[in-house]
Amino acid sequence: MGKSTIMENLNCQKYGVPLYGASWVPQKVIRSNLQTNDDDEVAGDGSLTSDASITTDASTQNYLVLAGGGGEGRSGIPNALLLAQFDFASNSLSDSPVDKLGTGADLPYRMAVHPDGEGLICSLPKSCRWFKWNTTKSHEKHKLGLTISEEVLTELEDVGQQLAVTFSDNGSLFAAGGEDGKLRVFKWPTMEIILNEGQSYSAVKNLDFSVDGKFLVSVGSGGPCRVWDVTSSKAVALLQKENDEVIGFCRFSRGSDGNQVLYTTSMQGERGSIVTWNTSSWNRMASKQIIRDPISAFNVSDDGKLLAIGTIQGDILVINSTNMHVQMTVKKAHLGLVTALMFSSNSRALVSASLDSSARVTIIQAKNKSGFNYWIIVIIGLLAILVYLVKTKGLIP
């Protein structure tokens, strides 16, 4: 029993700082930074030599980037970006960060990893900074690391705390939503601004680009959920709420029919629901209550088949998008509220982070396709027993 518990907990580790952001490092980054460095070494005469002791198969490595800290106070808790390693075979996270980059007095609150592997943007209390991947050598092995880029994002200097940051799927657009209610959309990497809106919200809480990059959805406090046409830089829809409904998170995805769909989370009293929206008419298509706890994090898998919810109680739920049934529940996955969720690119795993300083990777359990057949067998068996009993009692000649 004890051994099983220990093994189960290897997929959840505490890293010493409250965590606000979590993301998978793109495999392209791992391959380009580790494989080329580990396969060959340069000898003193300039020739290439192979050394089995430092060779690493980059294709089997999985890294997570985490962001968090104690803020500007004197808590003694540092602010940092962390890199952790996850092994699918053993279902285990590295028990300590494989790399740690301090950010001084600035708390890295939100982050967006560029999908093409260029680096990542972190929102700090007053500005946003650009970080790049690098490679360091430790104990005769190369490992992935992070460094602050010398490139300054001038357009995001002294803009105040950004509560939401995101790249479009192809990495050509970047959006940021601020604590001051301003919404900005830039072309990447030129940082040419194409949308600068400051009148819609008192604060922008969540953002997401559509799969094709044509639309941006925004959720804010003190205002409704809006959909923006990126090309015209104008709002094209105002999603209609019901009664006392409060929209919390928004995500575009691919539907089961191949068309785009928009999901939002909503709270009505203690009821947490997922609402599905048509991306042509922007009308509500369906709403499904999922949980009776406030939702603190939300995300959708790249293939659109799975949704994930995190709660203030530390629970995690994985939902099948086809029928909106809960496919998997992890009670008390964290001791504190869940702050971030992200599926791996192959939808096999879900990383979650929490204010309790823990990161967890949950392997997604496959839906039981044989369950239906099992119940048919049970019913047939019971009917056979019933017929046998009837016959033995002489009720059937």
Image: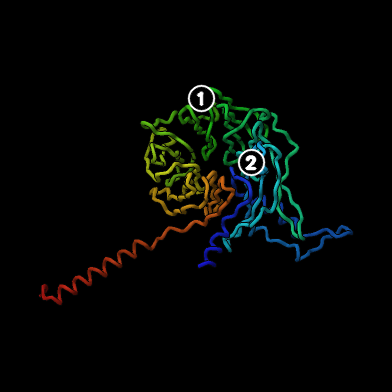
Most extreme residue toward the top is 199
Report crowding for label 2: few under 14, some 14 to 19, many 20 or more residues within 10 A (C-alpha). Answer: many
Q: Name the residue under label 2.
A: 70
Q: In which quarter of the image is the C terminus?
A: bottom left
Q: What element carries label 1?
A: loop
241 vs 134, left or right, is left
In-front residue for pair 332/280: 332
Most extreme residue toward the right is 45
* Residue 338 visible in the displayed image: yes
274 vs 334, left or right, is left
* Residue 26 visible in the displayed image: no
- Residue type, label 1: Ser
Q: Measured from the top left, where is residue 176 in percent x and y? A: 59, 33
372 vs 127, left or right, is left
Q: In this view, does 99 lie above or below 248?
A: below
The label shown at residue 200 is: 1
In-front residue for pair 167/80: 80
Q: Measured from the top left, where is residue 12 in percent x and y? A: 57, 55
Q: In this view, does 27 lie above or below 218?
A: below
Q: Which of the 4 image quarters holds residue 165?
A: top right
In-front residue for pair 386/228: 386
Q: What element carries label 2?
A: loop
- Residue type, label 2: Gly
Gap in angstroms between the C-alphas marked 1 and 2: 31 Å
Q: How many labels does the image show?
A: 2
